[in-house]
Amino acid sequence: MTAVEPAAELVVTDITVGGMTCAACVRRVEKKLGKLVGVTASVNLATGLARVSHPADVAPESLVAAVEQAGYQAALPVREDDEESAAADGEEAESRRERERLTVTALLAVPVLVLSMVPALQFRDWQWLCFVLAAPVAVWSAWPFHIRALRGLRHSTATMDTLVSLGTVASFTWSAYALFLGGAGGPGMRMSFSLLPSASDGGAHLYLEAAVSVPLFVLTGRFLEGRARRGTGAALRSLAELAAKKVTVRDELGERPIPIERLRVGQTFVVRPGERVATDGRVTRGTSAVDLSLVTGESEPVEVGPGSALVGGAVNAGGLLLVAATAVGADTRLARITRLVTEAQAGKARAQRLADAVAGVFVPVVLALAVTVLGFWLGAGADPQAALTACVAVLVVACPCALGLATPTALMAATGRGAQLGVLVRGPQTLEALQQVDTVVLDKTGTLTTGHMTVARVTALPGALGQEAVVRLAGAVEQGSEHPIGQAVTAYARRTGDAGPPPDVTDFAAVPGHGVSGRVDGLMIEVGAPDGRLPHELATALTAAEAAAHTPVLVRVDGRAEALIAVGDVLRPGSYRAVDRLRRLGIRPVLATGDRAAPAEAVAAALGIEEVHARCTPEGKAALVRELRRGGARVAVVGDGVNDAAALAGADLGIAMGGGADVAIGAADLTLARGDIEVLVDAVRLARRTLGTIRANLAWAFGYNVVTVPLAMVGLLDPMVAAAAMSASSVLVVANSLRLRGWQPSGARGRAHGTRGTRGGKAVVR
């Protein structure tokens, strides 16, 4: 019996790849890396990033060497603290070079186009001026295309650059032949122009307009495309810009600024009004309102005080805060969000893998078609100029650029926009799965509800004291209790009463299982479980509290029942609206909770959820998911706790609440950073819009070639028009993707100002 060798440990390395211009380049780099033993790669044209999975014993340097052997530039990522500035400098330098080359090309090419297209402007020996102007365009302006085409030739491959280079060289070479040997160089030569190509009289026809228009239009398209592609990554760059560079620490030595890299967990730092929170921490002193909109998409400022958790990147909109750091560097929430968005943008959807596979054979097929068209036209006795026109048009118009950009640009724009709204996806597969979900399993505690005890309703008897006074007295007595119900009553009294200190309590006593008592302002106050006969108003309130699965707390003043307080885990704002909108999207909600049946059914009744599963163990939730999937449903699970992790991992799509346990977030495919269940609806709609955009992009990319290539083959497409159409196709695809950056969730305004929902006359959201 032979021993089985353990599988080699796989690691993931990101490589920056330069020089890629179309989906055929992507396919070529992936194939070259895939030839290494145990190596698989996914290359993204829009980001220029190759995500490579390889055995640990394969050095990253050998991966870089493989990419360079394929004819492209490659580099390992720079250090994290230098990455942002290096990327910005590289993008700026590249944009400047593109702009300079395009400007010079336009200055040289435009006179050639005007003279070639307007016979009335053709003066004596105009053709020689055009030749002098066209030569630098055909050589210097098109030099990047020629170089990349030669590299591909050395590696027996062809890309879009091969097509552009051949089209430019063929047009310019024919024009040079016509000028020097074909009779087109004589004084007084005139040349008519038509958008539809036609044979002319012998060699007295030039293709200089094609020789300059192909590089001009392609460079213009690349420049606009590059600007648009950089725009799709704007959200990711804005996340990176939220990271602080310096922080002011306070210790026994006083206050002093230090680089953020030197900050350690446990150190106290200062956040002044208007400053950005340097890292994740917990407030130790001070109160303020913080703006989380750029981190989690939360529109309303959040009030914080001692003990409140803060997220790095939030903006302090109020008072001075002292914060103890709880996470630094790569462990912060902002760093995790940035990592999730980066990984999502580096992934590849199924549709894009198909497009890349098509593009891998597309260019060789186009080259074969061009040669076939040239041979067919010449063999049929057509004029050589007409044959050359058709051949060059086929070479130029058939560009797989749009195929390569159709999906990654849409994914970059969508994942960036999702991060701004508080929707964090792991990859394109997540968007595809989310678009197909028809059933969502919702946890109750912490997902549909707040996850902590809150006063849901107060019913007080009419009398001299009044509701506010009774609550104030009950809160004063309960402040000495450590029970969650007592803490909820105290918090409610502070929130609804005046800002002054609570009254003093004497003779305090706590009876386990019953409640607390004490003397306040000379009155004996008892707060505990209801017993005995109650007045009608309080008895009715008790029945309503039990029906809603809330805990009833009776307040007695000098032995007389004065008020009944219903305490429970109340619904999150927006839960009803979220469930209702999910149903409108055709998604069936299912409630699964480990809580008792009564609270589960009360929440389900308030939200209109028909299928309820109470007292579910973690194994029970996972089994429920398996059962639903066996029934043909495409299931998403939403949860926030450790007990949800198994169900999250076993679903078609796992969705974690951002404020939940790390293990739940780790098992999920999608995280709702705001902790707001209504964001799930936005995520579904964004996924559907994104997939619709991708389908539209691919339909255009494929349809464009299906229409234009046959037109070029039969001689109905001028090479200049072909160059413009080819460049426009790529720009249109990227521009269509950019529309996702401005996508707005419906109901955003309502959430910004607070949303209330009712069902059957009963308030379901406080």
Image (cartoon, grey):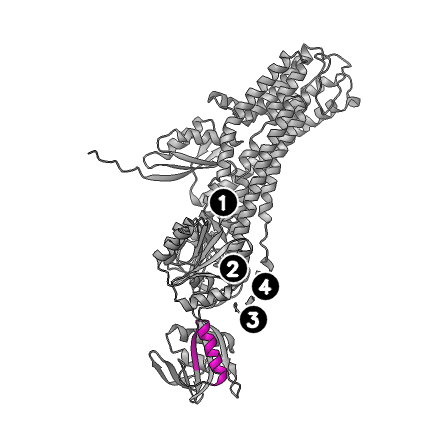
Disc on the earlier residue, 1 or 3 = 1
Image location of residue 699, percent across then percent down:
58, 36
Dot 3 crowding, Cα within 10 Å, few <14, some 14–19, many 20+: few
In depth, the one of 351 and 466 nearer the eye is: 351
Disc 4 versus disc 1: distance between alpha carbons? 32 Å
Question: Residue farthest to the right?
Answer: 120
Q: Which residues are magenta?
A: 535-554
Disc 2 versus disc 3: distance between alpha carbons? 18 Å
Helix, strand or loop under label 2? helix
Front: mark 1 or 3 = 3
Identify residue for label 2: 579
Disc 4 versus disc 2: distance between alpha carbons? 19 Å
Image location of residue 564, percent across then percent down:
46, 80
In depth, the one of 422 and 240 nearer the eye is: 422
Front: mark 4 or 1 = 1
At horizontal 55% and vertical 67% (from top left) the residue drawn is 759
Identify residue for label 4: 753
Identify residue for label 3: 761
